[in-house]
Amino acid sequence: MAVMTASRIDTSKVTDEQIGRAYKCFESNGTPFYMVESSRDLFDGEGKRVEYKVTWSKQFGFQCTCEAGKYGFKNCQKGVCQHVIISVAAAREERAAMKELNAKPVQREDVRKAAIKARAKALVAEPLNLSDEDKVRFGLN
Ligand SMILES: [Zn+2]
């Protein structure tokens, strides 16, 4: 069986609330993985919300520590559990946000610089070009 990759996962039905339950972590070797809170608000014996760890590797594809994941998602209609789908949605959201973060400050900075430059140029190049009316209004005549 081919390894399931993120590109084959439909995340269109994942809600923002669900994405909010997932957060990215890193193994000590830098490999990213996601922790996803149980959507049924399950708590463990210590009252901590149950979370599942979602990983992906070339060898095994997606894996999840939830019940469905333990059995290789063989009972999952979509081939993976909801936690994997949420993780993929979170990763996509994150990628889109990073893109925006990388693009926007540059644009904003450029706009700001252009505005300052234009204002400076106007101040330097153009002497006060007031109409007679303005001169009267500003008391300059
Ligand atoms: Zn799962």
Image: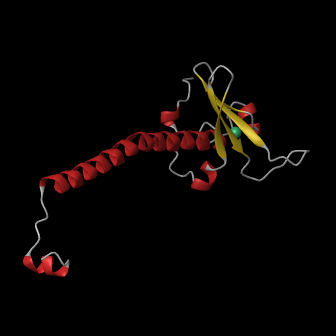
Most foreground residue, 40 or 79: 40
Task: Name the spot of residue 117 as percent of width and height, x first.
Answer: 24, 48
Quadrant location of residue 81? top right
Rendered view: 138 above or below 4: below
Describe residue 43's horizontal placement relative to residue 92 as left or right: right
Task: Name the spot of residue 137 as percent of width and height, x first.
Answer: 18, 81
Find ligand 1 in the image and state its quadrant.
Answer: top right
Rendered view: 102 above or below 1: below
Q: Residue at x 20, y 77 (%)?
A: 138
Rendered view: 62 above or below 75: above
Q: Residue at x 12, y 77 (%)?
A: 141
Q: Residue at x 71, y 51 (%)?
A: 39
The residue sitting at the front extreme is 141
Most foreground residue, 112 or 59: 112
Quadrant location of residue 32? top right
Task: Name the spot of residue 112 as percent of width and height, x first.
Answer: 32, 50
Task: Name the spot of residue 90 as percent of width and height, x first.
Answer: 57, 43
The residue sitting at the left extreme is 132
Q: Which color scheme did the rendering employ for the protein?
A: secondary structure
Describe residue 62's horizontal placement relative to residue 38 as left or right: left
Which of the image's four quarters has the N terminus?
top right
Is any atom of residue 62 visible in this view? no
Rendered view: 119 above or below 53: below
Most foreground residue, 16 or 13: 16
